[in-house]
Image (cartoon, grey):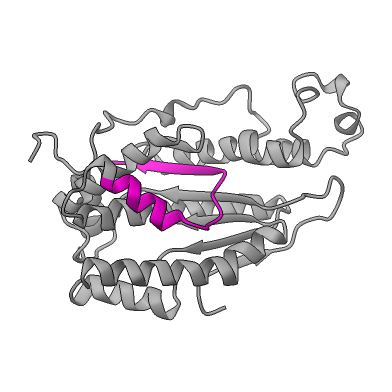
Amino acid sequence: MTAASSSRAAGRNDAPTRREGVFLVIEGIDGVGKTTQVSRLAEELRGAGEPVTTSKEPTDGPWGRALRRSFEEGRLSLVGELLHVIKDRRQHVEELIAPALAAGDVVILDRYFYSTVAYQGARLADPGEGSLARLAALASRGLPLPRMVFLLDIPAEEGIRRISEGRGDRPNLLERVEALDRARRTFAWLARREPGRFWVLDGLAPPERIHRTVLHLTLDVALWEELCGRPHGCETPSACPRRADDGCRWHRLKRALAPDDDGDDLSALVSPSPPRRPGRSATGD
């Protein structure tokens, strides 16, 4: 696979057989900790026997490499950047994402087309909601949509601090306070557009707390829908014969990964003062 950095592990084949894969995306500005959360979630699911594919955007394919190089050496024009992004993503979907979903994997991405809207959208002459909506339609046309998007939210200044101090990297041309602040606001706007798909988490919370929240939500929403999805049984074990004889794959996962779950503390979902308007700072500049 040249188009993406990926990893897959086989899971059990016991009933019920998954009809299709589960698609998850972790988003947020640079420095928020997406890569850590993708790795932790994949590790836990694989450890419980689930087939998992992980990847990132831009990919390690030719279009993705050229795009990342431009962020270091000199950005392309907006049109050139969008062409690279779209070609990279099309190859990513065709060669990795679609086959993995068809095979029944849990696919977890570090960035997807939402980042295109957030970062390339900041370069629009008019980065208002109408222009961003048109860019979102263009960037997502013909693509599989994730079941859940976990948006990790931190202030732009904290993202820069983590990049410079925590990672020891020099911020690239995308990683400037003003650019990250615009991207953050656009991510918040995207989340408000799709409240059934986005889950906004406080990226300032401890990484382990964020991980447990992401894991529990993945179990209780996406995997429950795919592996069980029945309106009975899980709350009343005696009503589900598959659970009673330990034949429920979802319940085995839940028991293995969240044995002490008694409702879960999901307070990490509350973002710190999410910004209200994309493309503008708090002062309207």
User: Vertical placement of 256 versus 174: above or below?
Assistant: above
Name the quadrant of the N terminus: bottom right
- Counting from the top left corner in percent of width and height, residue 41 is at 56, 49
Tell whether position 152 is magenta.
Answer: yes
Judge left or right: residue 280 versus residue 51: left
Instruction: Please name the residue shown 28% across and 32% down the image.
Output: 274
Write down the quadrant of residue 249 in the picture: top right
Instruction: Please name the residue shown 58% across and 72% down the image.
Output: 95
- Counting from the top left corner in percent of width and height, residue 189 is at 32, 38
The magenta stretch spans which residues? Answer: 131-154
- Counting from the top left corner in percent of width and height, residue 64 is at 39, 73
Q: Is residue 203 visible?
A: no
Judge left or right: residue 91 versus residue 74: right
User: Vertical placement of 185 versus 9: above or below?
Assistant: above
Tell whether position 111 is magenta.
Answer: no
Instruction: Please name the residue shown 58% across and 63% down the image.
Output: 97
Q: 46 and 95: which one is in front? A: 95
User: Vertical placement of 55 versus 238: above or below?
Assistant: below
Name the quadrant of the C terminus: top left
- Counting from the top left corner in percent of width and height, residue 92 is at 51, 69
Q: 147 and 227: which one is in front? A: 147
